[in-house]
Amino acid sequence: MVTASFQDKNSPAWQIVEHLQRHHSATIKDLEQMLGVTTTAVRQHLRTLQLEGYIDRATVHSGVGRPHHEYVLTDAARELFACHCDDLALTMLQEMFEMVGPEQVSTLLERVSSRLAARYADSVTAEALGHRVEQMAGVLNRQGILTDVLAQDENTIILKTYNCPYHELAQEHREICEMDQDMLQRVLGSSVSLSACLMDGDGGCSFVVKRNGNHVTKEGASIPSEDPHFQRE
């Protein structure tokens, strides 16, 4: 059951949980700086979150110094970030995957990707690629998907998400990740590749958006884009 403190996304409790979802762990000092409050206030929030089962305290041994404590999320807290798709729609999709072959699944996901891209197109209208990526991040954040935008260099932008709306389905069908990548490519009108993935145990999904039309593979190699939806700026 979600506590009342999480109904307000600006509450200190929610800010702590969201910070841990993005950064995986934090010390009391980290949280003091993030919230701008005293150590006593941070400890009170942490104590409440621990009692409610949303965070754990871990002892970290690093270097030659004394061990220190860091706080991490529990599985119960990660459920707060699950983008609960309509159960009926998700169940139908799971059944469909089991009923049809790989070729039909590919066609189905391509159609879903196209529909999603069309739905988001009205919200992603900027001319500059960087602004389009920011607008897309805004769309995802409004849907409950924690998203950051990081400029890697003048030709590369990273769109990073920290929770997956199709987590259970994607665990069994990695084609879902390809669908997400294809949808972003359609909406942004630029080359998009997946360099890190939650399904691989990474801390988030990192979508690499390139201005120059080159895909960056997970191994770091660049290959020319052949996607028919790619448009140069």
Image: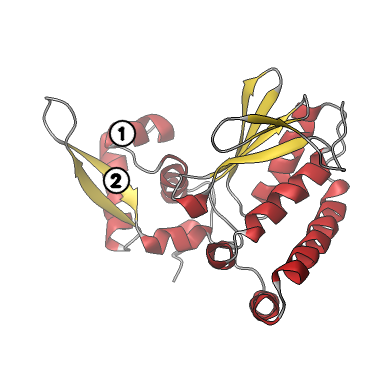
For the N terminus, the quadrant is bottom left
User: Which residue is denoted by mark 2 in the rendering?
Assistant: 71
N-terminal label among 2 and 1: 1
In this view, the residue in front, 115 or 78, is: 115
| Quadrant in the rendering for residue 106 | bottom right
Q: Position of residue 31 (x, y in %)?
A: 36, 36
CA distance separating discs 2 and 1: 17 Å
Label 2: state its secondary structure.
strand
User: Which residue is denoted by mark 1 in the rendering?
Assistant: 38
Residue drawn at the location 42% of the way across and 35% of the way down: 35
What colour scheme governs how the chains and residues are painted in the rendered image of this protein?
secondary structure
Q: Amino acid at mark 2?
A: Tyr
Q: Amino acid at mark 1?
A: Thr
Q: Position of residue 81 (x, y in %)?
A: 52, 57
Q: Position of residue 135 (x, y in %)?
A: 76, 38
Residue drawn at the location 70% of the way across and 76% of the way down: 89
Local crowd at mark 1 within 10 Å, few (<14), some, or many (≥20)? few
Label 1: state its secondary structure.
loop
Local crowd at mark 2 within 10 Å, few (<14), some, or many (≥20)? many
Q: Position of residue 62 (x, y in %)?
A: 19, 31
In this view, the residue in front, 190 or 3, is: 190
User: In the picture shown, does residue 71 fall above or below 65?
Assistant: below
Image-based side of 111 in relation to 202, left or right: right
Image-based side of 142 in relation to 201, left or right: right
| Quadrant in the rendering for residue 33 | top left
Total of numbered circles in the picture? 2
For the C terminus, the quadrant is top right
Residue drawn at the location 68% of the way across and 25% of the way down: 156
Q: Tell which residue pokes out farthest to the top in this image.
A: 154
Q: Which mark is residue 201?
A: none
